[in-house]
Image (spheres, rainbow, N blue to C red):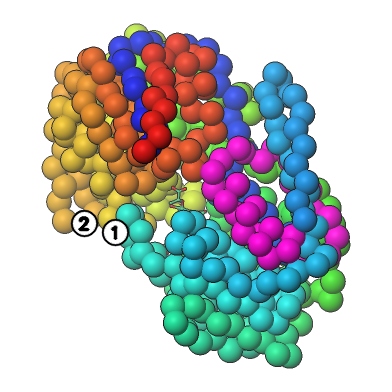
Amino acid sequence: MDKIKIIGGNQLNGKIYISGAKNAALPLVCSSLLTSDEVTLKNVPQLSDITFLNSLLKNLGVKINESTKLHDSQIIKAFSYRADDIKELIAPYDFVRKMRASYYVLGPLLSRFKHAELSLPGGCAIGARPIDIHLSSLEQMGANIEIKNGYVVADAPSGLHGSHIIFSKASVGATCNILMAAALAEGITKIENAAKEPEIANLIDLLNGMGARIEGKDTSILTIEGVKKLHGTEISVVPDRIEAGSYAVAAAITHGKIELINARAEHLQQPLRILEKMGIGVEEKNSSIIIDGVGKHIIGEDIYTDYYPGFPTDLQAQFMALMTIADGASLVTESIWENRFMHVPELCRMGANINIHGHASAIVRGVKKLSGAPVMATDLRASFALVLAGLVAEGETIVNRVYHLDRGYERLEEKLKGVGANIERIRESD
Ligand code: EPZ
């Protein structure tokens, strides 16, 4: 398994191009199942999660064409999907086990083909991750759902119908699944307490571009008037706010200055304000953000993760890495996932001073320096936090289990090398 080796201490300066968002691309890809026409997605990040979801769609019978073009000297990928000859209505265990977001096929398949089977996703490193809200909402829309041999077996012989659904939690995944299902359902669906993440807005734009009738974008109440048929269209994947936030911390932690090209400041308001409170310079431009940590004194600050537009749970670990070398104490409260402090013991092995209280809170007391060590993380964002710690630590850090990073950070070493990091991938075939 590949590893990443980092020699810490370099100040990072320059520009980093922000890719399309993984968490936006995944439901967009599955929306292509709603029509027999071609749906084209531009600015798709080159990530193992996308490759993986594409192979699931191919398995269902979707034809996929890939193209690349050069923009701002960046290779930008586009994929065209045509679901005009679907042969399978099953997302098997082997796919769902490797990638939970495979559950995004459930809403579109059930809505268009009246039947779908999905291996029930289990928990994962960050929590139990139930999908009860997805399932009960589909039941409210007329689906008959059974759990058989570890599979969700969903039928809607006379099709799905509109319903008034109130989510108990503002779930990103359930909002996407029900939006896709409701687009082809008969009548009007109203979702209350819907998620408002920018990735949802991207999905609404795609679905409306396909002929859906969805109102309430960027609000927690979405109204979907079902249509009989959707057609092809094309759309760009929104820039990845979590990738941008992760590299913002890379600039701050190394006391460097990085311009995040193609980043959308409006999607990162809470994290940018926290960076400013921590003493870091932030300049918001039209289509970029400049993060300036040069000569800055980094001060501890508290964060509380919450649904968008609150502080994103997907940046909690990266900000905690920054807090480890800040002056003073920081309190981190994780309100979304029940087990998202797996990076803490690894950061402590590098010299950080962090105490976890219960499941949801951690106190970080800043230390003067971190020291390099072999480390490993159990999820994507925690792995990036260890890379950040490695960038500022004295000596060598080896980050194991790089496959987590490959799921969500496009060309990570190349991007960090480009701004001056001493980082390389050690390829190992075992
Ligand atoms: C999405 O996960 C993201 N994944 C996650 O990013 C992100 O952490 C999360 O949203 C929160 O922002 C993708 O977009 C692929 P949820 P999702 O449904 O949709 C509870 C990353 O690092 N819940 O919004 O699975 C759930 O347990 C990943 O890129 C139920 O109780 O998250 C959690 O406490 C990790 N029942 C809360 O809601 C349900 O049926 C929010 O989960 C669904 C969710």
**Is disc 1's CB within 8 Å of ligand 1?**
yes
- Three-letter code, disc 2: His
Report the side of 97 relative to 19 (left or right).
Answer: left
Relative to the observer, which residue lies in front, 71 or 171? 71
- Three-letter code, disc 1: Glu
The answer for how far apart the CA atoms under marks 1 and 2 are is 6 Å
Q: Residue at x 19, y 21 (%)?
A: 371
The answer to which image quadrant residue 71 occupies is: top right
Instruction: Give the position of the N terminus as an image quadrant.
Output: top left
- Whether residue 95 appears in magenta in the rendering, the answer is no
Give the residues drawn in magenta, as a range.
34-62
Q: Secondary structure at mark 1?
A: loop
Residue 244 in sight: yes
Tag 1 residue: 338
Ligand 1's image quarter is bottom left
Q: Residue at x 73, y 78 (%)?
A: 113
Classify 92 as above or below 401. Answer: below
Instruction: Give the position of the C terminus as an image quadrant.
Output: top left
Q: Position of residue 56 (x, y in %)?
A: 62, 59
Mark 1: give few (<14), some (14-19) or many (20+) Cα within 10 Å: some
Classify 377 as above or below 280. Answer: below
Pointer 1 with pointer 2, Cβ within 8 A = yes
Report the side of 21 relative to 76 (left or right).
Answer: left
Label ID, residue 222: none
Q: Position of residue 222 (x, y in %)?
A: 64, 67
Q: Residue at x 46, y 72 (%)?
A: 120
Tag 2 residue: 359
Classify 338 as above or below 422. Answer: below
Query: Which sits earlier in the primary sequence, circle 1 or circle 2?
Result: 1
